Image: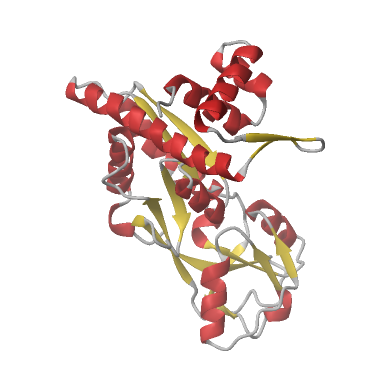
Amino acid sequence: MNININNLKIFLEVAEKLNITEAAKALYISQPAVSKAVKNLETSLNIKLFIRDKHNGLLLTDVGKEILVLARQLKVIENKIYQIASQENKLLSGKVKVGSFPAASTNLLPETIALYRSKYPLVSIELFEGTSNQIKEWVKDRTVDIGIVTSPFDDYEYEILVHDYMVAIISEHHSSRSKEEIDFEEYQNEIIFCKGGHETALFTILQEHNIPFKENLTVQTAETLVNMVKRNLGIGIISKFTLSSVPNNLIIKDIHPRISRDIGIVAHSFDEVTPAAKEFIHIMSQLNKEGEEI
């Protein structure tokens, strides 16, 4: 069985966009040409790659989802071949796809990207932002080459960039403003919790200290948490790293028990990533040596 690589590339574009019109525009070819390429690929493989749903439009079949992951791997390999050839010619090019959560994008990426671009101006960088769990899935299914996530790092190869910990934030009018630290158990009825990579570290430590977690008020972003605390609605619990990415003039307190987590780069294997991605990892690691605590 011979697979037409061009048909596979067209399938990849359609599968990423789940829209034939958008895929045709991205590929600069006609919609009939896109449809024909997908049909030819289905015929050569003797499978159905897509189904049409009245409410949701174009959807991948289960086998289509599996082939999408493999097609992404093939694209990575193709990119790696070109990058190795470019590296041999002392002119690294290609693309690096990076997954990152917003605070890491704000605190870690600008300096890394600036230095990387100065060394490798022919390499383009595509940034995908989401939660740590989303990024881990993107690494898993090859949507991105590398991800910047919070611990735990699961089964991925990783390198720690920052040792982070949780802090409490309060308004200047809160009754605890004179205390040296905030006891989580004492103030648990006033806690405002911010999701986004903090959950595992928080729940693990509370469980170790037999402290129940009461979900009084939970928000999705650091900006919302800061605004809630400014209105004196409670005590915000957030990582110091994330807080540093949001302008605020709130009072910051240590909390008891101390809740720590790590932030690091993950990949399936650092040896298997493209030369361009490997250089990105190297530069980012050098700028954040030995996972220093913020």
Q: Is residue 94 left or right of residue 254?
A: left
Q: Quadrant of residue 89?
A: top left
Where residue 87 sits in the image (x, y, percent)? 22, 26
In front here: 201 or 88? 88
Could you tell me if residue 180 is visible in this image? no
The C terminus lies in quadrant: bottom left
Q: Residue at x 68, y 80 (%)?
A: 188
Task: Report the number of numbered marks.
Answer: 0
Where residue 198 sits in the image (x, y, percent)? 56, 64
Which residue in the rendered view is the most extreme toward the bottom? Answer: 210
In front here: 88 or 121? 88
Q: Is residue 57 left or right of residue 105?
A: right
Q: Residue at x 53, y 54 (%)?
A: 132
From the viewer's perspective, is residue 96 above or below residue 202? above
Where residue 4 sits in the image (x, y, percent)? 44, 22
Q: Is residue 60 left or right of residue 52?
A: left
Where residue 219 sits in the image (x, y, percent)? 71, 60
The N terminus lies in quadrant: top left
Q: Residue at x 24, y 28 (%)?
A: 84
Could you tell me if residue 40 is visible in this image? yes
In front here: 147 or 235? 147
From the viewer's perspective, is residue 64 above or below residue 226? above
* Image color mode: secondary structure
Q: Residue at x 63, y 61 (%)?
A: 195
Q: Quadrant of residue 109?
A: top left
